[in-house]
Image (spheres, rainbow, N blue to C red):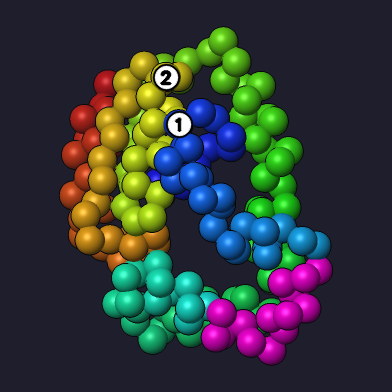
């Protein structure tokens, strides 16, 4: 959901101007942790606001994120995802080489990634259902949880043996 799958073809339109700025910022070991130390809450506020088209999230959710990311080693652990992207991309490419996903797969996009993940998975997935949630930011479960559930529940219910 609202992501890319390594460097598989299909994300070119989304990446035409390069990856989002935070990919590089988070990928440099130690940089983001050093710059953000003591400002974790402000950084979280930025992402929660931009990831929900400015709608934000309830104070309790925001506070839980800020608390979690203010703990020792939390930022390093969070940013390790970005630092592992090159190795993960190689692993994904190897995993799909000559293979197809045969399980029913639901892909959900919104803004800014949109249909990029669907385009990446379409050539390697036998049963793909691609959906876009309009007027939704990057953090789909926090921005439009009802719209997300309206897609997930029927998909999951239809997969019963």
Residue to which mark 2 is pinned? 123
Do the residues bearing badges 2 and 1 touch, measured as CB atoms within 8 Å? yes
Picture residue at 68% right of the left edge, 65% below the top: 25
As drawn, which residue projects farthest toward the top? Answer: 98
Residue to which mark 1 is pinned? 10
**Image height of 142 relative to 113, above or below:** below
Picture residue at 71% right of the left edge, 47% below the top: 84
From this viewpoint, is residue 109 visible? yes
- Quarter of the image for the C terminus: give it: top left
Classify residue 120 as left or right of residue 147: right
Say what secondary structure mark 1 lies in.
loop
Q: Earlier in the sequence, mark 2 or mark 1?
A: 1
Residue closer to the observer: 43 or 15: 15
**Percent position of residue 93, x then y:** 62, 25
Q: CA distance from mark 2 to mark 1?
A: 9 Å
**Percent position of residue 95, x then y:** 62, 22
Q: Is residue 112 magenta?
A: no
- Splitting the image into 4 quarters, where does residue 90 fall? top right
From which residue to which does the magenta span run?
30-43
Picture residue at 67% right of the left edge, 59% below the top: 24
Q: Is residue 38 magenta?
A: yes
As drawn, which residue projects farthest toward the front? Answer: 17
**Percent position of residue 87, x then y:** 73, 38
Picture residue at 77% right of the left edge, 70% below the top: 31
Classify residue 159 as left or right of residue 32: left
The numbered disc on residue 108 is none
Classify residue 91 as left or right of residue 6: right
**Image height of 97 relative to 70, above or below:** above
């Amino acid at each position: 959901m609202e992501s890319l799958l390594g460097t598989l073809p299909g994300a070119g339109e989304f990446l035409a101007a390069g990856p989002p700025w935070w990919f590089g910022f988070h990928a440099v070991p130690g940089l983001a942790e050093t710059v953000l130390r003591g400002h974790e809450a402000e950084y979280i506020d930025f992402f929660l606001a931009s990831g929900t088209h400015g709608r934000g999230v309830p104070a309790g959710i925001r506070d839980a994120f800020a608390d979690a990311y203010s703990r020792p080693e939390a930022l390093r652990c969070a940013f390790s995802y970005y630092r592992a992207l090159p190795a993960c991309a190689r692993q994904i490419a190897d995993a799909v080489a000559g293979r197809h996903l045969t399980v029913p797969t639901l892909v959900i996009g919104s803004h800014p990634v949109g249909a990029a993940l669907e385009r990446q998975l379409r050539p390697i997935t036998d049963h793909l259902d691609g959906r876009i949630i309009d007027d939704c930011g990057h953090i789909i479960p926090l921005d439009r949880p009802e719209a997300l559930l309206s897609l997930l529940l029927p998909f999951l219910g239809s997969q019963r043996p």
